[in-house]
Image (cartoon, rainbow, N blue to C red):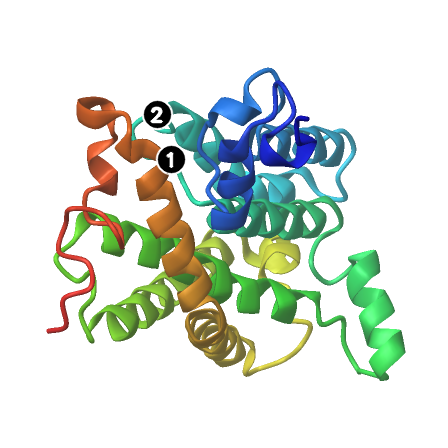
Amino acid sequence: MTSSASSNPPGSSTSSDSAVESGSAGPSAGSRGRFSLPAVLVIVVAAALIVSGIDPYDRATWLMETFWIILGLPLAVLVWRRFPLTGLLCCLLALHALILVHGGQYTYARTPVGEWLRDWFGLARNPYDRVGHFAQGFVPAVLVREIMVRRSPLSGSRWLAPMVVCGCVAFSAFFEMIEWWAALIGGSAADDFLATQGDVWDTQWDMFLALVGATSALLLLSRVHDRQLAGLQRQFAAAGPECPPSLSGAPGGPGPAGRGR
């Protein structure tokens, strides 16, 4: 007698299951012949970007809001083999891109999602720009953390979280300077890009929400992120010398991760 429970069915693969559990977005033996998560996200974001650019409310505003996607999407594809990202970060970047696309298509003060939120919560203004600036801290926090863990001596250090938050707030402040420069150059034509909606404290709100977003991301996602970084390292460990050098400092890898400082 033979037991069918003692072996996996022909053609089954446990590597794909472990890749899903670890959340890594890199290639696996079980994913060959199928679209990977990063490829699907790239297609979704690219399609949304193209559709939003067909007839945006204001072309100049659309270009300024989606500039980061136009720059970042090809860059991520070009460096992917050398610097693959975790599945968590890929999903967050795609979500942030869709937030930017929606704001660029309609302008932040006129987005349908923001109008729905305004009516639902009984607000005096369209809050979509608040959502965008919260995301401007939340998503980059995971991006900066992943880069620092994998490419800096801060991996495993108690200084990692403060430096991530400082980096995100610094970028938010730099973005406010970009808005200031846009106002100086474009005058009233830059109103749609600024999306202040008459709030004299809009700049302070933007930076504060980025701070809250970055802090929230670290509090909520750090453990999940560490597990995915470790899974990504294990996934590529079998590649030996072909393992991307950017993974050497990831948790569970041969780098300095896990050492408290």
Any part of residue 222 in sight: yes
Q: Amino acid at mark 1?
A: Pro
Compute the Cα span from label 2 to label 1: 6 Å
According to the picture, the residue beneath numbered tag 2 turns out to be 81
Q: Measured from the top left, where is residue 192 in percent x and y?
A: 66, 56
Residues under numbered marks 2 and 1 in contact, where contact means CB atoms less than 8 Å apart: yes
Q: Image height check: is 83 above or below 205?
A: above
Q: Measured from the top left, where is residue 174 in percent x and y?
A: 36, 61
Q: Amino acid at mark 2?
A: Arg
User: How dense is the environment of label 2, judged by Cα within 10 Å: few (below 14), some, or many (20 and up)?
Assistant: few
Q: Image height check: is 224 above or below 218?
A: above
Of 166 and 241, nearer the camera is: 241
Numbered badge on residue 84? 1
Q: Measured from the top left, where is residue 96 in percent x and y?
A: 58, 52
In the image, taking residue 252 as reference, residue 56 lies left or right, namely: right
Which SS class for mark 1? loop
Q: Residue at position x 25%, y 41% from top? A: 247
In the image, taking residue 107 as reference, residue 244 lies left or right, namely: left
